């Protein structure tokens, strides 16, 4: 199989510049460094250049051309001067290519802009879009919705996210399909751990509020903006609903637990059966009946220990994605707790913690990505021509569908 192309139009193959082409058989490039995965080929497929020279196809693979878009089935061709983007291949993969006078665009199946096409002499050069912010998740264009929800939901795994969307347990979550070759570097940085023990999936209680599991995380090496060092994590055994409370000292744990017990008793009308925690001194108080685990045996309090790990991993990943200062770790953990209560499924019961506690499905369409840029409404007596908002960083999930400036931060120089 042979095809005719210009061998070199300058040294553009070394740059992230792609030219739209309607005559080639697939996307192709001459730079092996672009590939995130590459499979060598042993076939006799070759390319015929305009000067009658030929070059063999060395391999086929995937090329991340921007932070939100990856090209698949790209051929590696030696001595190819330009990176070529095949129009028919884009159409076969579900994209829409629009060519109008003064308007050249490539859109995905969700009508989202994937890249713009700019006239460059007698050819069309493709400018791929970068994501808003220093994200390092490489994804296919049709997966932009999957990637967006992956980040909104605290970097939830792609497979579990696809499973969750298929179960119709959350209002506002679209149908999603997991794809291979999706690499999220913040997840790699924030979640890599050693193998853990297999959890025991049993429902030991009959209703929310019968048994609470508790543990503390900390002290953190970085003091929060509010002056806190520790976080108290409490989990309901039946629903797996979780609460977090940030503390300057672990001595503050008792008051929060006591108030929570009273509030849950008023909500449910049932007395609490037991509280379970580790052997930490902050939980030893004569006024509350506790079930303590043995010293240095965290497996006996494994439910909340695993929850701690999940919250910290998600928070660490979200802070890493946008390089958010670590002093905002409580805001990150608070966000992960808010999200996890609405997405994680209770084993066996196959319902979210939110539905088990409140009786109806959660709605998630109001969520935004932690650390993304937001606009903060200015208050006070403003000049007529003064901007009405300033740039900020979104840090806290709202408790209603209406976003407020409460969960934002305005860093200098943003």
Image (cartoon, helix red, strand yellow):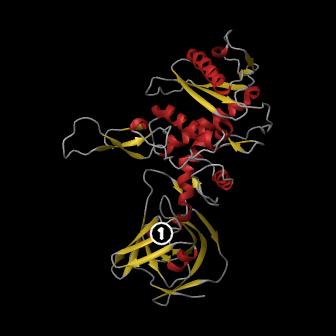
Residue 339 rendering spot, x and y as whole percentages: 58, 41
Residue 321 rendering spot, x and y as whole percentages: 50, 46
Relative to 141, residue 368 above or below: above
In the shown orientation, is residue 92 left or right of residue 8? right
Residue, disc 1? 107
Residue at 54%, 34% in the rendered image? 334
Which residue is the extreme one toward the top?
A: 286
Relative to 87, residue 405 above or below: above
Q: Nearer the viewer, residue 29 or 141?
A: 141
Occupied quadrant, residue 384: top left
Q: What is the count of numbered marks?
A: 1
Residue 396 rendering spot, x and y as whole percentages: 47, 38
Q: Secondary structure at mark 1?
A: strand
Relative to 320, residue 62 above or below: below
In the shown orientation, is residue 279 left or right of residue 22? right
Residue at 48%, 66% in the rendered image? 111
Q: Nearer the viewer, residue 271 or 164?
A: 271
Residue 82 visible at all: no
Q: Quadrant of the N terminus?
A: bottom right
Which residue is the extreme one toward the front?
A: 269
Residue 287 rendering spot, x and y as whole percentages: 67, 10
Residue 146 visible at all: yes
Q: Nearer the viewer, residue 263 or 295?
A: 263
Occupied quadrant, residue 16: bottom left
Q: Quadrant of the C terminus?
A: top left
Q: Nearer the viewer, residue 236 or 280?
A: 236
Residue at 50%, 85% in the rendered image? 23
């Amino acid at each position: 199989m042979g095809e005719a192309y210009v061998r070199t139009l300058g040294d553009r193959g070394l740059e992230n510049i792609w030219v739209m082409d309607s005559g080639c058989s697939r996307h192709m490039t001459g730079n092996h460094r672009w590939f995130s995965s590459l499979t060598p080929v042993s076939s006799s497929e070759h390319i015929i250049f305009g000067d009658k020279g030929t070059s063999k196809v060395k391999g086929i693979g995937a090329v991340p051309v921007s932070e939100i878009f990856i090209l698949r089935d790209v051929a590696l061709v030696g001595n190819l001067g330009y990176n070529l983007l095949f129009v028919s291949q884009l159409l076969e993969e579900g994209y829409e290519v629009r060519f109008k006078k003064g308007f050249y665009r490539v859109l995905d199946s969700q009508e989202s802009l994937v890249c713009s096409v700019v006239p460059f002499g007698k050819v069309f050069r493709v400018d791929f879009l970068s994501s808003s912010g220093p994200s390092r998740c490489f994804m296919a264009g049709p997966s932009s919705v999957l990637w967006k929800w992956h980040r909104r939901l605290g970097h939830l795994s792609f497979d579990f996210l696809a499973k969750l969307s298929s179960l119709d347990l959350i209002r506002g979550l679209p149908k999603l399909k997991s794809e291979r070759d999706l690499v999220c570097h913040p997840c790699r940085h924030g979640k890599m751990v050693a193998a853990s023990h297999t959890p025991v999936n049993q429902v030991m209680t009959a209703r929310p509020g019968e048994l609470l599991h508790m543990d503390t995380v900390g002290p953190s090496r970085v003091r929060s903006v509010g002056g806190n060092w520790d976080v108290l994590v409490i989990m309901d055994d039946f629903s797996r609903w979780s609460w977090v409370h940030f503390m300057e000292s672990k001595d503050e744990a008792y008051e929060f637990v006591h108030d929570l017990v009273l509030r849950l008793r008023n909500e449910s009308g049932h007395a609490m059966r037991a509280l379970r925690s580790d052997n930490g001194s902050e939980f030893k108080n004569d006024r509350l009946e506790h079930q303590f685990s043995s010293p240095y045996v965290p497996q006996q309090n494994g439910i909340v220990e695993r929850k701690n790990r999940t919250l910290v991993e998600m928070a660490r990943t979200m802070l890493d994605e946008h390089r958010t200062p670590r002093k905002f770790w409580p805001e990150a953990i608070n966000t992960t707790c808010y999200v996890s209560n609405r997405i994680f499924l209770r084993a066996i019961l196959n319902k979210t913690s939110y539905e088990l506690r409140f009786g109806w499905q959660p709605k998630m369409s109001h969520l935004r990505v932690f650390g993304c840029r937001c606009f903060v409404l200015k208050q006070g007596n403003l000049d007529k021509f003064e901007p009405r908002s300033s740039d900020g960083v979104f840090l806290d999930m709202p408790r209603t569908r209406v976003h407020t400036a409460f969960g934002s931060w305005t860093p200098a120089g943003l």
